[in-house]
Amino acid sequence: MFMHNKKLQYTVRVSEPNPVLASFMLEQFGGPQGELAAAMRYFTQGLAEEDPGRKDMLLDIATEELSHLEIIGSIVAMLNKGVKGTLAEASLAEADLYRSLNSGGNSHTQALLYGGGPSLTNSSGVPWTAAYIDSIGDPACDLRSNIAAESRAKIVYERLINITSDSGIKDALGFLMTREIAHQKSFEKALYAMEPNFPPGKLPGMGKFANLYVNASQGPGDTEGPWSSGEQWEKLDRVEESIPLDGGDGMASVSLSAQERTAINALSERTMSDPQSDPMTGADLGAGPGAGSTTRRR
């Protein structure tokens, strides 16, 4: 059960309305790295979690993410206050109102469709989607994904801080950015509290391939590092000569019943192409400059 406290987790002070900046702020409201996506990701993980410690942590952080959604949404609403009033009351001349609505971004959409309130979209107006949630139900996988999500959110907050000179907004965004750091630390601790935590899942990898580094992109720029060389790696440079790696013939095959084989043979014979033909096509008949080589009319 949830109860709403009317006080924000952090005070929002906006110096003046700015509908364009409000549009950018929506990235952290309804965008893929935003607070709603984070809250839904951690809530769904927490509800399914079997470990009591991780469950408690996930639900704590999920609930806090909702409070962050409230903060960023309040910033958006304050930035849209001016245009909300002028549009609702038609207090500007038509030309001035039109110019104010088209000052940049998708601020006109925010004003017309949502009355200046925060919409569940990203900064380009794309609706929020549950496809942003990438949980797979394995704690080692999900915690790594959560760490990456918090990292990406921090970077978006940094970029939003860099595009505003409003000290109050910078302060609130700095708080939200810092909480991303704290959450990442919690997820890191939870990940390494599981031993072992790599590789994810239960099944072991195939030993002879687990230490193999395939140098599949060769030429100028080839560089070695701890990701490809050292005692834990067997580096494969002669890739073409070494495939298939399993020692087979490198082809795809399947066992078919006699009935399936008969049907496939019939399909193959019916749809067989003639490699000796050079048929006239619509592209040939309508070819003009720039068409390249075509079959000549007979």
Image: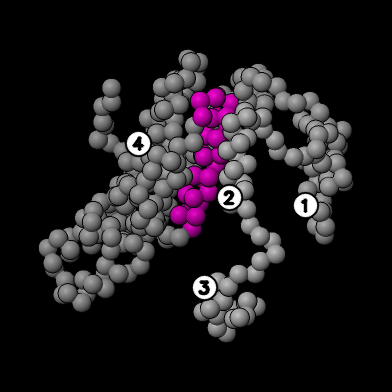
Q: Residues within 10 Å of mark 2 (few under 14, many from 20)?
A: few
Residue located at (62% from left, 53% from top): 272
- Is 146 placed left or right of 252 in the picture? left
**Which residues fall within the magenta stretch?**
136-162
Q: CA distance from mark 3 to mark 4?
A: 61 Å
Label 4 sits on residue:
67
Of callouts 2 and 4, the N-terminal one: 4
The answer, for residue 94, to whether it is visible in the render is yes
Of callouts 1 and 3, the N-terminal one: 1
Counting every numbered tag in the picture gives 4
Q: What amino acid type is highlighted by mark number 4?
A: Ser
The answer to which of 212 and 54 lies nearer the viewer is 212
Question: Tag 4's secondary structure?
Answer: helix
Quadrant of image for the C terminus: bottom right
Foreground disc of the pair 3, 4: 3
Q: CA distance from mark 1 to mark 3?
A: 40 Å
Foreground disc of the pair 3, 2: 2
